[in-house]
Amino acid sequence: MADRKTDGEDTKRFFKMDRFYQMNAQWFYMTREGEERGPFDSKRDAEGDLIDYIRHLAQLEAFGQKK
């Protein structure tokens, strides 16, 4: 679901997206890069994978190899 947000000082509109979603009893999530990850058996599994994914990106960035 998207929640509309405004910053109050100008007319820009921002949308907060729930990156996790369920389809056909399986869980997925979208990365900020637009990559779909999944399927996972539970939302908790998807959340755990997202944490691992973010750690991996941080390691790549630390070594100058960002995707």
Image (tube, rainbow, N blue to C red):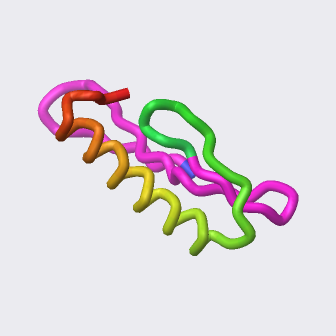
Give how far across and how far down residue 61 sits, in percent.
23, 36
Q: Residue at x 25, y 25 (%)?
A: 11
Q: Residue at x 30, y 29 (%)?
A: 66
**Residue that sits furthest to the left in the current view:** 9
Number of marks in picture: 0
Q: Residue at x 58, y 63 (%)?
A: 46
Main SS of residues in magenta: strand
Q: Nearer the viewer, residue 40 or 63?
A: 63
Give how far across and how far down residue 12 sits, in percent.
28, 26
Give how far across and how far down residue 64 sits, in percent.
20, 29
Q: Quadrant of residue 23?
A: bottom right
Tell me which segment is drawn in magenta: 2-29
**Residue that sits furthest to the front in the current view:** 63
Magenta region includes residue 25: yes
Horizontally, residue 37 falls left or right of residue 63, namely: right
Q: Residue at x 48, y 47 (%)?
A: 17
Q: Is residue 42 above or below residue 66?
A: below
Horizontally, residue 61 falls left or right of residue 36, namely: left
Give how far across and how far down residue 57 sits, in percent.
34, 43
Give the position of the C terminus as an image quadrant.
top left
Magenta region includes residue 43: no
**Residue that sits furthest to the right in the current view:** 24
Q: Is residue 64 above or below residue 8?
A: above
Horizontally, residue 59 falls left or right of residue 9, namely: right
Q: Quadrant of residue 24?
A: bottom right
